[in-house]
Image (spheres, helix red, strand yellow):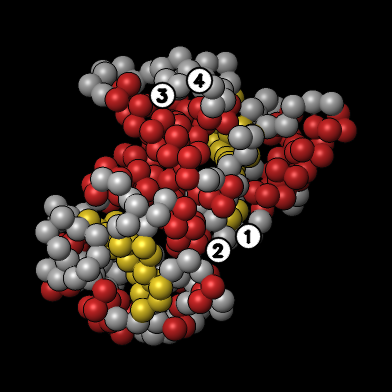
Amino acid sequence: MKHLLTVADLDRGTATELLDEAERFEQALLGREVKKLPTLRGRTVMTVFYENSTRTRVSFEVAGKWMSADVINVSASSSSVSKGESLRDTALTLHAAGADALIVRHPASGAAHQIARWMEQWAREENRVAPSIINAGDGTHQHPTQALLDALTLRQRLGDIEGKRIVLVGDILHSRVARSNVSLLDTLGAEVVLVAPRTLLPVGVDAWPCRVSSSLDAELPGADAVMMLRVQAERMNGGFFPSAREYSINYGLSERRLALLGDDAVVLHPGPMLRGMEIASAVADSPKSAVLQQVSNGVHMRMAVLFRLLVGQEETV
Ligand code: CP
């Protein structure tokens, strides 16, 4: 595996190996005062973010540092991107400066794929080795490491994901997290249900490997997990229908709705959460919530991905 651009490139075996590898990293670091493994010593990893991020950028940085890689963070606003430098020139420049892996977040769907194509073409022409490209979120398209860390969290809380019913709620239309999770959960054998207002469902959703419902109350009693999604106002050009109040009434995870879930069911949210609208604070902070476990798993999952791309699948921790 050279790049990680979409979960569609992961078959069940590869995805399971990555989940297992993440758990090995978690075990290898458990109880250690000094969290430092020599795994990526001498390798250079760069994050290049054209959109804001807390969880993804920080967890990639921590993952790289815990494996002794040199980690450089580049943000669009403080780099020469703000002077008009192209995406291609930026990527080539960072590789020329020493990047073995580029972790890219960009508002355009397909940006990470395009960078990977440019890098492969450049490497062929120059007879050099292309850097690995990791998609850290491209527009409304894909966020593969988020889906992997969600799968890891579900597996830890529920056991085998096969046959489990996972309900995704909210702004499916703009969500790369939803697209990535529907695809990966289907690969892992889960039953996926989407709950959303029609206005926040994409055209063509009926062809996705999942069922669509408009009633959250009806779907919660049989759910093993409910994954709340962020309403992405920044992708709505100022318009949002239904209103925030209607959304909260019909699709928010309130304390009343939490009580409809079974005893062992789990609540996920990729963050950042809009407390009070998407999810009640008492629910986000309840024992059923796996939100902070998702964040911790994000570090171990990203260690596993960096390890697989930069060291290879023959090795394990
Ligand atoms: N879940 C997620 O991608 O969060 P950030 O935008 O904070 O990285």
Element under label 4? loop
Percent x, y for residue 211? 40, 73
Upstream in sequence: badge 3 or badge 4: 3
Element under label 1? loop
Q: Is residue 183 above or below residue 222?
A: above
Q: Is residue 219 above or below residue 145?
A: below
Element under label 3? helix
Residue 315: assigned label: 4
Left or right: where does residue 248 sit relative to residue 107?
left
**Alpha-carbon span between mark 3 and mark 4:** 17 Å
**Alpha-carbon span between mark 3 and mark 2:** 30 Å
Nearer to the camera, 81 or 146: 146
Few, some or many residues within 10 Å of mark 2 (<14, 14–19, 20+)? many
Residue 66: assigned label: 3
Placement of the C terminus among the 4 image quadrants: top left
Q: Which residue is mark 1?
A: 109
Percent x, y for residue 110? 66, 56
Upstream in sequence: badge 2 or badge 4: 2
**Alpha-carbon span between mark 4 and mark 1:** 32 Å
Three-letter code for the amino acid on which mark 4 is drawn: Glu
Left or right: where does residue 49 sit relative to residue 245?
right
User: In the rendered image, which quarter is residue 120 located in?
Assistant: top right
Upstream in sequence: badge 2 or badge 1: 1
Three-letter code for the amino acid on which mark 1 is drawn: Ser
Residue at horizontal 68%, vertical 49%? 113
Q: Nearer the viewer, mark 3 or mark 4?
A: 4
Q: Which residue is mark 2?
A: 140
Placement of the N terminus among the 4 image quadrants: top right
Upstream in sequence: badge 3 or badge 2: 3
Three-letter code for the amino acid on which mark 2 is drawn: Thr
